[in-house]
Image: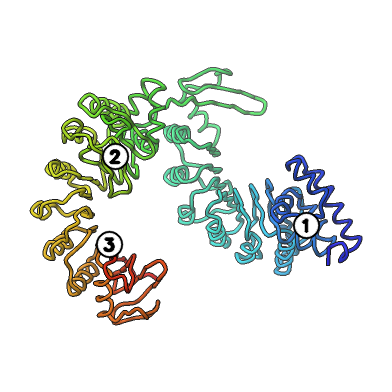
């Protein structure tokens, strides 16, 4: 049954309301949409159009539309209400009201029935809504369950809570945690315990003007560091404290505000400390302080602090510069000589990754730090010296989570495929080679958590070992692009990861177990391994306290023989257990089997029971705890 036959005249009335609403919001929609809407039966419109139009309709129109017929009632209840600038829940003695945008929903009884009525009405009006700022007067009637039902599917940019009694504190903290992406403000109408004040999460605004007892100096600076804006009553503060407060606020990149109260004699002492006296006049300056306005009738004075960035305490400046990106450091150093010196003399902070790669030209190299690429330095002494000069202009030190170096470049088209693989081209090592001296000059001042080296030629092995020795506190990974001598493999220091997948010859049994014990993670091509060796491997990996991984390949026939001995056959199914082995997944189309034994996960990729000589990739991973 069509809406007009079902509802008759009410439908026409609802449709007229809908069209009048379109006229009011038509400037918000493309002309093609409006022409289409005016020609069509609204319920024949595509769902995406309807939902977009319903986001433009006011709350008052939604209330009117839903009363016209059941079709409009369902449409209103099932669509998003759009964006509103503000809203609130206000508590009175025996009732409460709710405002959303310019629509006031009032006279709800302040009891359980009133809250259930509000939640029911909210379900009839929309299934979601976005509000820029929403304020709630916290009350014991507004239980956490009711508030979560009412705010379900609400996107709130700033959630403001007003507390009048301490019994609502825990509920408020739980409600704040329900909106992790929102900004939060908190207004306290009573004096809370210091422990609760210290437990508050970072807030966009904290209002404690009802706390009449002066806050201690220590508590004030804690609140100033944690919260963006503060509205306080009294604070124990000296003229040195007010100077430090001004420095902290002025150096913050955010817009901040602070409100405190003090007696006139204390304020006069502060102003005298800055050089401001009773005779001072408008626009007069006192160092960095300038008088912007004096109004004796209203007993008002407006001051402006011109903050000298370089006047900040040294320890504060150094911490501040650690939070600035490399790109911003490049821009900052161009502003003036003082800032240029500051950039050059401070630590750059921590960056997740970095690497040295070959440049676009054969004879150049580039260095990436975070998301900034310093590129096209000549691969010779002149180019390295140029990079060192640039680095000295940007920082004295830097911390990098993972830094990778291809020790020897022989190709104009070298490129990283992943953290362990490099493709190389063909120009000669003697012509373009990063010597150890060059590498040490480039990495000077770097604190590296994980140093990753990619080695492609045996002639560079000693250089690689020397470079590792220069970073004794770092973890090391090594990816070999060639077959290394057994004696050199045995001489390697313990590594976080060793990649030997370029060694196509099977690795002997004794060498495999030596490498397995010595290094945390191994990536191999082929290993001489019996079923007993595989069981011993699982025992070694499982008993290790570290998170470990092992990768090697074998043929399908060998793997199927192992599985049959373990009691796993072609007819086995997921979730079954065979001895200590548990089958997690069998995906025949994807040729994947996933097993678990004790604290080891085993992934078999490209495995077929009848594949015989088909290569199977075996991944063994030690896990911290058993997955669910």
Residue 504 versus residue 549: which sits nearer the camera? 504
Q: Earlier in the sequence, mark 1 or mark 3?
A: 1
Instruction: Identify which residue is drawn at 32% across, 80% down.
Output: 569
Residue 78 is drawn in which quadrant?
A: bottom right
Q: Which residue is mark 1?
A: 44
2 and 3 marks in contact (CB < 8 Å): no
Which one is in front, 214 or 417?
Answer: 417
Which tag, 2 or 3, sits closer to the chain's start? 2
Task: Find the distance from the CA under tag 1 to the CA under tag 3.
Answer: 58 Å
> 10 or 435, which lies in front?
435
State the residue at coordinates (65%, 50%): 131
Residue beneath the point at 37% across and 80% down = 572
The dot on residue 414 is: 2
Does residue 443 appear left or right of residue 9 in this picture? left
- Is 18 placed above or below 261 here? below
Image quadrant where one finds the N terminus: bottom right
**Viewer-nearest of discs 1 and 3:** 1
| Dot 3 alpha-carbon crowd within 10 angstroms: few under 14, some 14 to 19, many 20 or more | some
Element on which disc 2 rests: loop
Q: Quote the CA–CA distance across marks 1 and 2.
A: 58 Å
Q: Position of residue 306 (x, y in %)?
A: 49, 24
Instruction: Give how far across and how far down residue 338 sits, in percent.
Output: 36, 22
Mark closer to the observer (1, 2):
2
- Where residue 417 is drawn, which disc sits there? none
Labelled disc at residue 547: 3
- Disc on the earlier residue, 1 or 2: 1
Q: Quadrant of the C terminus?
A: bottom left
Residue 621 appearing in the image: no
Look at the numbered disc 3 and give the secondary structure of its residue. loop
């Amino acid at each position: 049954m069509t809406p007009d036959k079902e509802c008759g005249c009410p439908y026409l009335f609802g449709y007229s309301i809908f069209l009048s609403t379109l006229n009011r919001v038509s400037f918000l929609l493309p002309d093609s949409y409006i022409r289409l809407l005016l020609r069509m039966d609204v319920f024949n419109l595509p769902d995406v159009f309807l939902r977009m139009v319903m986001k433009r309709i006011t709350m008052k129109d939604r209330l009117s539309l839903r009363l016209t017929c059941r079709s409009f009632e369902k449409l209103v209840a099932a669509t998003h209400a759009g964006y509103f600038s503000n809203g609130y829940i206000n508590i009175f003695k025996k009732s409460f009201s709710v405002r959303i945008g310019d629509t006031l929903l009032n006279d709800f009884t302040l009891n359980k029935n009133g809250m259930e009525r509000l939640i029911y009405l909210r379900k009839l009006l929309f299934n979601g809504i976005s509000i820029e700022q929403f304020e709630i007067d916290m009350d014991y009637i507004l239980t956490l369950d009711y508030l979560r039902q009412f705010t379900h599917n609400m996107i709130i940019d700033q959630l403001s809570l007003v507390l009048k009694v301490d019994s609502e504190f825990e509920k408020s903290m739980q409600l704040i945690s329900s909106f992790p992406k929102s900004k939060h403000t908190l207004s306290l109408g009573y004096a809370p315990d210091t422990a609760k004040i210290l437990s508050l999460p970072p807030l966009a605004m904290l209002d404690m003007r009802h706390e009449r007892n002066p806050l201690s100096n220590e508590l004030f600076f804690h609140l100033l560091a944690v919260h963006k804006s503060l509205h306080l009553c009294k604070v124990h503060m000296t003229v040195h404290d007010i100077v430090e407060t001004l420095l902290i606020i002025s150096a913050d990149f955010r817009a901040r505000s602070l409100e405190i109260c003090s007696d006139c004699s204390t304020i006069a002492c502060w102003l005298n400390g800055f050089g401001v006296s009773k005779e001072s006049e408008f626009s007069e300056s006192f160092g960095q302080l300038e008088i912007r306005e004096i109004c004796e009738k209203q007993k008002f004075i407006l001051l402006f602090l011109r903050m000298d960035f370089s006047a900040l305490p040294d320890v504060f400046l150094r911490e501040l510069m650690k939070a600035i990106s490399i790109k911003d450091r490049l821009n900052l150093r161009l502003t003036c000589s003082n800032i240029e010196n500051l950039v050059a003399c401070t630590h750059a902070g921590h960056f997740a990754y970095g690497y040295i790669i070959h440049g676009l030209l054969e004879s150049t190299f580039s260095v990436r730090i975070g998301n900034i690429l310093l590129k096209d330095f000549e691969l010779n002494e002149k180019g390295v010296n140029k990079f060192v000069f640039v680095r000295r202009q940007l920082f004295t030190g830097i911390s990098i989570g993972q830094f990778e170096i291809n020790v020897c470049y022989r190709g104009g088209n070298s490129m990283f495929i992943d953290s362990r693989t490099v493709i190389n081209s063909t120009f000669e090592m003697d012509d373009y080679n990063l010597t150890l001296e060059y590498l040490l000059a480039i990495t000077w001042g770097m604190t590296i958590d994980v140093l990753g080296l990619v080695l492609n030629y045996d002639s560079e092995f000693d250089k690689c070992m020397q470079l590792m020795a220069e970073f004794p506190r770092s973890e090391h990974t090594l990816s070999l692009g060639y077959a290394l001598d057994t004696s050199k493999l045995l001489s390697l220091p313990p590594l976080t990861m060793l990649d030997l997948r370029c060694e196509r010859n099977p690795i002997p049994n004794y060498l495999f177990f030596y490498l397995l014990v010595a290094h945390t993670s191994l990536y191999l091509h082929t290993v001489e391994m019996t079923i007993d060796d595989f069981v011993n491997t699982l025992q070694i990996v499982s008993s290790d306290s570290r998170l470990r991984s092992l990768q090697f390949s074998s043929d399908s026939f060998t793997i199927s023989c192992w599985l049959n001995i373990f009691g796993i056959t072609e007819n086995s199914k997921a979730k079954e257990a065979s001895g200590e082995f548990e089958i997690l997944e069998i995906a025949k189309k994807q040729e994947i089997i996933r097993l678990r034994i004790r604290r080891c996960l085993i992934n078999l990729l490209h495995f077929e029971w009848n594949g015989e000589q088909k290569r199977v990739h075996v991944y063994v991973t030690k896990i911290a705890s058993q997955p669910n």
